[in-house]
Amino acid sequence: MLGSLGLFVRYLVKNVGVSYYDENYYVFVAERILNHGLFGFQDDLRTYLYPLLIAFAKLLFGASPASKALVCVFQYAVFLYSLRLVAATSVKLTGNRAAGHLVFAAGALNPYLVQATTLFLTDILAACLVACGFNKLLFGDLRLRKNRLLATLPFAAAVMVRPASLLFIPIALLGLAVRRYVEPIRLPKILLSFALSLAVFVPQLYMNVTKFNHWTPIIHVPLYTAQTHGAMRCLKLVGVVIPGEPPPLCFANPWEDNSCHSLLEFAMKSPLAFSRSAAAHMFAALDWGRVDTYITDYYARSRFPASFLLQTAWFLIALGFIRFLRHRRELPSGTRALLLFLAAAIVADLGFLATVMVESRYGYPVFLMALPFLGFSLSGGWPSRKATAAIAASWLLWLVLSTALSLWMEGTSGRIHWLAWWKG
């Protein structure tokens, strides 16, 4: 906790007095809410809930940095709470308290995630809400009203924070069906809780109907279509705040087919190139590069230590999943089914990310959802010397390969040249 708080304070001091690009737009929408009211403002690019949070802070502190600090503290508190839930789930699944400590540390000491809590961006808050929802829906005691609320409301709130989170609502309903199949839970009360949570959509639906004559509970602009078009051109997109440098940094797709007008056409005409692009997009969602969401230095010294820590966490998650599969018969059949469903939900999210123009922050939900598997890396006892050596060798190989792929991807931008920088 001390280490995590230290990271939070460091990035809060760095980011509290300045906002960039999307951050400024959320502040602009918050000011619209303050000027016209929740049911009087209009915006066709953002859902209302996150700007409403900023509006509350500005109502208390105005335009001072204290308003951003308040939102950041709130986001950090939600972040820690979601980690506590995930850690408790890991202890419940593995019967190992050390697993809970490891899972909590892997999240709380992740500089990318802590940094994200100090920005006016929706990604970390939406990811935490989704993680809370899945942990309670799949592994919580749904006989308790509080747990039923935490298993349903976060999904609706996540959509109103970040519309892409809509993907998780049908997945959550499938998860509920799986849990009902393996455990005699009472569906009516949980479904009622799901139905009541949809009330969160009402302000957005009201705005879309009255301002745009469009019956939709999310944004009415087809952003996904734009994202799929961008995915054919860019493997990854990064925001840049270096003086004199263009703001968007595109990691160009070397397999782009300029004759294709849609992602579906690209998949049909060039299935091999499409498969490579999709795999690269999924890797881009797991490889977060520099700690800062907005690049202030192409050759930041913190880039490699942070990346090594992140890739080590992904390696431990993969190791934990393998150990879960090896020892799955030691777990109750219902627990096995729910964990396999969670793995399938993670794959579904990655499949969605394979079709869009990825930014690093899009991978936050994947990381938080996958953390319970990290706890299994401590299960099964300490391996033999031979197995330990094999694990260590695999870890080093993964670091080398992931770093090489990451640097290659950055090189496609035409602006980042690590070899030339190193020689210079």
Image (cartoon, helix red, strand yellow):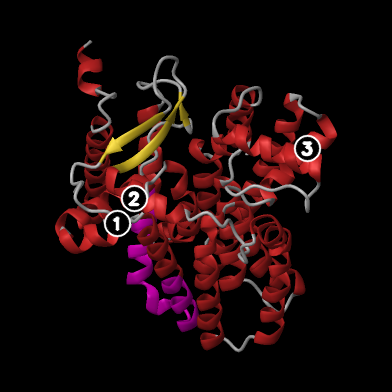
Where is residue 81 shown, x and y percent of the image?
66, 52
Quadrant in which the C terminus appears: top left
Furthest residue to the top?
424
Q: Is residue 23 left or right of residue 319?
A: right
Identify the element where label 2 is drawn. helix
For the residues marked 3 and 2, what is the alpha-carbon distance in whole angstroms?
36 Å
Highlighted magenta segment, given as a residue range: 314-341
Disc 2 to disc 1, C-alpha distance: 6 Å
The answer, for residue 67, to whether it is visible in the render is yes
Residue 95 visible? The answer is: no
Which of marks 3 and 1 precedes in the sequence?
3
Residue 262 - label: 1
Q: Quadrant of the N terminus?
A: top right
Residue corresponding to mark 2: 229
Badge 1 local density, few (<14 within 10 Å), some, or many (20+)? some
Q: Amino acid at mark 3?
A: Ala
